[in-house]
Amino acid sequence: MRLFLISAYIGLITLCHTATFGQGIKFEELTMRAAMAKASDPASPKLIFMDCYTSWCIPCIEMAKMEFPKKVMGDYFNPKFVSVKFDMEKGEGKELAKKYNVSAYPTFLILSASGQEINRVVGKAGAEDFIEKVKAALDPKNSLAGLKAAYEAKKDLTNGLPYAKALYQNSKDPSPVLEEIFDHAEEYERFSVDFLEMALGTVKFGSPFFRKIMLEKQHLDLAMGTEVINRILFDKVRKDMYIIAYENGARYNVFFTPKEVEDIAYTISLLKLDPQEPENHICRIALFVVNKDLDGMIAYYKRYIQQLPTNTVFKGILEDVLFKQTPKATEAQKAAIKDYFKSASESYGKTARQYDAITEKIK
């Protein structure tokens, strides 16, 4: 009897899982040409749904594993779409990424049977929310052309923000629209949270529009709080500065001139971020790297980085940046780098001994 109950329970769980996950979106292994031919079948005309993903994109993986297999997804997509997926960094995906100007992941394209883009959805979402986003994307007034027409008819914040967002999602610069709003909107609109999040999130660091916004820094701070604004500004360049510091720009297609890095380091320094947080030093370190100023870099590490708390991951990352400069160092510079790490080792050793002493006192 007990065995029967266990078997019945397992069967019920399996049935529920199948009902929820077993009938999701049917992605077909087709070339783009084959997908267009299938969608054009007069007997069963459909649109094309394309999942544009990369192997390293975590939200892409989450959508593929957790959301697309759900029954509600299959019920909506399978009757209406020929669904395909392409890795945008491999094979035909590379050509499609260029053709449709895909640079953010995950991006989901809604195409006509002839391969013309109708609209796109960018970013992950739960199954039900994602379906609603696709339904909205299919509404002509929410297409890029429709949003542009609405903005041209009435250039205000209500029409401008959706249009700017659509431009950004289509890998187009929304700054001209946002700057026009910023120049002509009322104060309560240009410093609203919705506008500032969009403007600061998309504007290119150091561009003329960026500088125009930064001239109003006190208003930004009043609108969202100094700490929040400073974090948004720092986050805009943080990842790129790590790439520059590690000299991996070519690998990730991230390029800055020394002057651009200097402008970034100068601007970030004015934010007066906590110097005890190791990560807040990355812009200065990137500047030493692009200027090939290893002597200045070593001196900076000895003056500032060495004094930082030892129990932080980011301090280790910064020290790894210095270590990777060793192969190109002169003998004198290698000796100075070695001296830095020897002093760091002694500091770590002192900390370890302090913890050992505390441990010994616990009986």
Image (tube, rainbow, N blue to C red):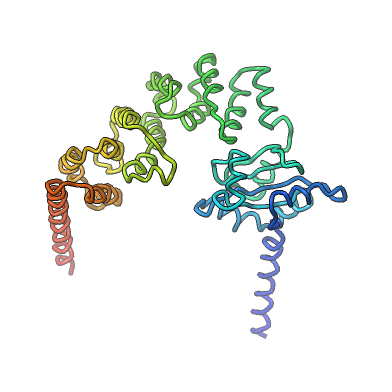
The residue at 69%/77% (across/down) is 8
Quarter holding residue 141: top right
270 sits to left or right of 66: left
269 sits to left or right of 343: right
Q: Observer-nearest residue: 91 or 119?
A: 91
How far across and how far down the image is residue 108, in percent? 63, 45
Vertical comparison of 358 with 335: above or below: below
The residue at 40%/24% (across/down) is 222
How far across and how far down the image is residue 315, in percent? 26, 48
Q: In which quadrant will I find the N terminus?
A: bottom right
Quarter holding residue 163: top right
252 sits to left or right of 304: right
How far across and how far down the image is residue 240, in percent? 39, 40
204 sits to left or right of 258: right
The residue at 19%/43% (across/down) is 301
The residue at 48%/32% (across/down) is 201
How far across and how far down the image is residue 124, in percent? 58, 47
Vertical comparison of 274 with 82: above or below: above
Q: Observer-nearest residue: 285 or 41?
A: 41
